[in-house]
Protein backbone atom coordinates (compact mmCIF):
# COMPACT_ATOMS: atom_id res chain seq x y z
CA UNK A 1 0.00 0.00 0.00
CA UNK A 2 2.85 2.37 0.86
CA UNK A 3 4.42 1.81 -2.56
CA UNK A 4 1.12 2.67 -4.29
CA UNK A 5 0.95 5.98 -2.39
CA UNK A 6 4.56 6.73 -3.30
CA UNK A 7 3.91 5.92 -6.96
CA UNK A 8 0.80 8.11 -6.97
CA UNK A 9 2.73 10.96 -5.38
CA UNK A 10 5.55 10.58 -7.91
CA UNK A 11 3.04 10.54 -10.79
CA UNK A 12 1.31 13.68 -9.53
CA UNK A 13 4.64 15.46 -9.06
CA UNK A 14 5.75 14.47 -12.56
CA UNK A 15 2.50 15.73 -14.11
CA UNK A 16 2.80 19.05 -12.26
CA UNK A 17 6.41 19.58 -13.35
CA UNK A 18 5.70 18.74 -16.99
CA UNK A 19 2.54 20.87 -16.98
CA UNK A 20 4.42 23.78 -15.43
CA UNK A 21 7.00 23.54 -18.19
CA UNK A 22 4.29 23.50 -20.87
CA UNK A 23 2.27 26.32 -19.32
CA UNK A 24 5.45 28.38 -18.98
CA UNK A 25 6.65 27.80 -22.52
CA UNK A 26 3.37 27.71 -24.45
CA UNK A 27 0.85 29.39 -22.17
CA UNK A 28 -2.38 27.90 -20.91
CA UNK A 29 -4.32 28.23 -24.16
CA UNK A 30 -1.69 26.50 -26.29
CA UNK A 31 -0.91 23.67 -23.86
CA UNK A 32 -2.85 20.48 -24.37
CA UNK A 33 -3.39 17.63 -21.95
CA UNK A 34 -2.36 15.27 -24.76
CA UNK A 35 1.06 16.93 -25.05
CA UNK A 36 1.51 17.04 -21.27
CA UNK A 37 0.55 13.36 -20.95
CA UNK A 38 2.90 12.36 -23.77
CA UNK A 39 5.82 14.30 -22.24
CA UNK A 40 5.11 12.78 -18.82
CA UNK A 41 4.88 9.31 -20.43
CA UNK A 42 1.36 8.86 -19.09
CA UNK A 43 -2.12 8.61 -20.50
CA UNK A 44 -4.48 11.54 -20.70
CA UNK A 45 -6.79 9.49 -18.49
CA UNK A 46 -4.17 9.54 -15.76
CA UNK A 47 -4.18 13.34 -15.80
CA UNK A 48 -7.97 13.41 -15.69
CA UNK A 49 -7.90 10.95 -12.80
CA UNK A 50 -5.67 13.19 -10.68
CA UNK A 51 -6.76 16.68 -11.82
CA UNK A 52 -10.22 16.36 -13.48
CA UNK A 53 -9.39 18.79 -16.31
CA UNK A 54 -6.81 21.22 -17.69
CA UNK A 55 -8.05 24.08 -15.54
CA UNK A 56 -7.77 21.91 -12.41
CA UNK A 57 -4.21 21.01 -13.37
CA UNK A 58 -3.38 24.66 -14.02
CA UNK A 59 -4.80 25.61 -10.62
CA UNK A 60 -2.43 23.15 -8.92
CA UNK A 61 0.52 24.40 -10.99
CA UNK A 62 -0.25 28.02 -10.06
CA UNK A 63 -0.59 27.01 -6.42
CA UNK A 64 2.84 25.35 -6.54
CA UNK A 65 4.34 28.51 -8.08
CA UNK A 66 2.74 30.64 -5.34
CA UNK A 67 4.09 28.32 -2.62
CA UNK A 68 7.57 28.29 -4.14
CA UNK A 69 7.63 32.09 -4.24
CA UNK A 70 6.43 32.25 -0.62
CA UNK A 71 9.31 29.97 0.40
CA UNK A 72 11.77 32.27 -1.38
CA UNK A 73 10.31 35.28 0.43
CA UNK A 74 10.80 33.57 3.78
CA UNK A 75 14.34 32.51 2.91
CA UNK A 76 15.37 36.00 1.79
CA UNK A 77 13.68 37.76 4.71
CA UNK A 78 15.43 35.44 7.15
CA UNK A 79 18.82 36.75 5.99
CA UNK A 80 18.49 39.65 8.43
CA UNK A 81 17.49 40.12 12.05
CA UNK A 82 16.33 43.68 11.36
CA UNK A 83 12.56 43.81 10.80
CA UNK A 84 12.84 46.60 8.19
CA UNK A 85 15.44 44.67 6.20
CA UNK A 86 13.31 41.54 6.49
CA UNK A 87 10.37 43.45 5.01
CA UNK A 88 12.49 44.92 2.21
CA UNK A 89 14.22 41.60 1.42
CA UNK A 90 10.84 39.84 1.33
CA UNK A 91 9.37 42.45 -1.02
CA UNK A 92 12.39 42.19 -3.30
CA UNK A 93 12.24 38.39 -3.28
CA UNK A 94 8.59 38.47 -4.33
CA UNK A 95 9.14 40.84 -7.24
CA UNK A 96 12.31 39.09 -8.42
CA UNK A 97 10.69 35.64 -8.26
CA UNK A 98 7.45 36.77 -9.91
CA UNK A 99 9.23 38.00 -13.05
CA UNK A 100 11.49 34.99 -13.53
CA UNK A 101 10.74 33.20 -16.80
CA UNK A 102 9.81 30.03 -14.89
CA UNK A 103 7.08 31.90 -12.97
CA UNK A 104 6.08 34.99 -14.96
CA UNK A 105 3.59 33.60 -17.44
CA UNK A 106 1.85 31.24 -15.01
CA UNK A 107 1.71 33.73 -12.13
CA UNK A 108 1.21 37.10 -13.79
CA UNK A 109 -0.44 36.46 -17.14
CA UNK A 110 -2.39 33.21 -17.25
CA UNK A 111 -3.12 32.88 -13.52
CA UNK A 112 -5.57 35.78 -13.27
CA UNK A 113 -6.91 35.20 -16.80
CA UNK A 114 -7.60 31.48 -16.41
CA UNK A 115 -8.78 31.33 -12.80
CA UNK A 116 -10.11 34.87 -12.47
CA UNK A 117 -8.83 37.66 -10.25
CA UNK A 118 -10.82 36.55 -7.22
CA UNK A 119 -9.39 33.02 -7.18
CA UNK A 120 -5.91 34.39 -7.92
CA UNK A 121 -6.16 36.88 -5.04
CA UNK A 122 -7.32 34.21 -2.60
CA UNK A 123 -4.30 32.11 -3.53
CA UNK A 124 -2.03 35.16 -3.14
CA UNK A 125 -3.55 35.88 0.28
CA UNK A 126 -2.65 32.36 1.45
CA UNK A 127 0.95 32.71 0.32
CA UNK A 128 2.85 35.97 -0.30
CA UNK A 129 0.27 38.30 1.20
CA UNK A 130 0.05 36.15 4.34
CA UNK A 131 3.79 36.58 4.84
CA UNK A 132 3.60 40.32 4.22
CA UNK A 133 0.76 40.72 6.73
CA UNK A 134 2.64 38.62 9.29
CA UNK A 135 5.76 40.75 8.97
CA UNK A 136 3.78 43.97 9.30
CA UNK A 137 2.01 42.61 12.40
CA UNK A 138 5.36 41.81 14.00
CA UNK A 139 6.58 45.30 13.18
CA UNK A 140 3.41 46.83 14.62
CA UNK A 141 3.80 44.80 17.83
CA UNK A 142 7.40 45.99 18.15
CA UNK A 143 6.31 49.61 17.72
CA UNK A 144 8.23 50.07 14.46
CA UNK A 145 5.32 51.37 12.37
CA UNK A 146 3.32 54.55 12.41
CA UNK A 147 -0.27 53.86 13.46
CA UNK A 148 -1.95 52.54 10.31
CA UNK A 149 -4.35 49.74 9.44
CA UNK A 150 -2.27 46.61 8.88
CA UNK A 151 -4.94 45.24 6.52
CA UNK A 152 -4.92 48.40 4.42
CA UNK A 153 -1.12 48.53 4.40
CA UNK A 154 -0.91 44.85 3.43
CA UNK A 155 -3.26 45.31 0.49
CA UNK A 156 -1.61 48.55 -0.66
CA UNK A 157 1.90 47.08 -0.57
CA UNK A 158 0.77 43.83 -2.15
CA UNK A 159 -0.92 45.76 -4.95
CA UNK A 160 2.19 47.86 -5.49
CA UNK A 161 4.39 44.76 -5.62
CA UNK A 162 2.05 42.93 -8.02
CA UNK A 163 1.81 45.93 -10.33
CA UNK A 164 5.59 46.41 -10.16
CA UNK A 165 6.11 42.78 -11.15
CA UNK A 166 3.79 43.21 -14.14
CA UNK A 167 5.70 46.32 -15.20
CA UNK A 168 9.16 44.77 -14.75
CA UNK A 169 8.08 41.70 -16.72
CA UNK A 170 7.55 43.92 -19.78
CA UNK A 171 10.78 45.89 -19.50
CA UNK A 172 13.80 45.01 -21.66
CA UNK A 173 16.28 45.68 -18.82
CA UNK A 174 15.01 43.52 -15.98
CA UNK A 175 17.79 44.39 -13.52
CA UNK A 176 17.52 48.14 -13.98
CA UNK A 177 13.73 48.00 -13.65
CA UNK A 178 14.00 45.86 -10.52
CA UNK A 179 16.46 48.28 -8.93
CA UNK A 180 14.27 51.28 -9.80
CA UNK A 181 11.24 49.52 -8.34
CA UNK A 182 13.00 48.57 -5.14
CA UNK A 183 14.21 52.16 -4.70
CA UNK A 184 10.58 53.32 -4.85
CA UNK A 185 9.44 50.51 -2.51
CA UNK A 186 12.17 51.53 -0.05
CA UNK A 187 10.87 55.11 -0.01
CA UNK A 188 7.32 53.89 0.47
CA UNK A 189 8.32 51.67 3.37
CA UNK A 190 10.33 54.43 5.02
CA UNK A 191 7.19 56.55 5.03
CA UNK A 192 5.70 54.11 7.54
CA UNK A 193 8.73 54.07 9.84
CA UNK A 194 7.99 55.30 13.33
Image (cartoon, grey):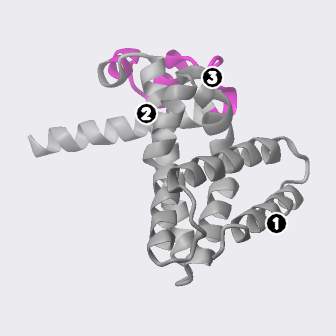
Question: Which sits in the foreground, 118 or 173?
Answer: 118
Determine which of the numbered discs, if any, sits on residue 113 in the image. 3
> Disc 2 vs disc 1: Cβ atoms closer than 8 Å?
no
Identify the residue position indicated by label 2 in the image: 60
Q: In terms of sequence position, does the residue under pointer 1 or pointer 3 come before the other? A: 3
Q: Quadrant of residue 5?
A: top left
Q: Which residues are magenta?
A: 24-48
Q: In front of the other: label 1 or label 3?
A: 1
Q: Position of residue 166 (x, y in %)?
A: 75, 41
At 51% across and 75% down in the image, what residue appears? 78
**The furthest residue to the left:** 1
Residue 106, percent from left and from top: 61, 35
> Along the horizontal axis of the image, is 46 left or right of 87?
left
Task: Using a 10 Å C-alpha cutoff, classify the residue at mark 2 as few (fewer than 14 neighbours), some (14 to 19) or many (20 or more).
Answer: some
Q: Secondary structure at mark 2?
A: helix
The answer to whether residue 183 is magenta is no
Label 2 or label 1, whichever comes before in sequence order? 2
The reply to whether dot 1 and dot 3 touch (C-beta < 8 Å) is no
Indicate the secondary structure of the residue bearing disc 3: helix
Q: Quadrant of the C terminus?
A: bottom right
- Report if residue 46 lies within the magenta region: yes
Say which mark, if any, is on residue 52.
none
Q: Position of residue 174 (x, y in %)?
A: 84, 54
In the picture of the structure, the residue carrying the numbered disc 1 is 183
Secondary structure mostly seen in the magenta stretch: helix
Residue 87 in sight in this render: yes
Amino acid sequence: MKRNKEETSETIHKIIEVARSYFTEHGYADSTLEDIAKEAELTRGSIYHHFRNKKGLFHIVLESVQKEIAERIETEAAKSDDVWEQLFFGCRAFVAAAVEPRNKRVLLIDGPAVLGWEAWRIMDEHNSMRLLRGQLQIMEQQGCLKPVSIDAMTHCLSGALNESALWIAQMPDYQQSLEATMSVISHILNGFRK
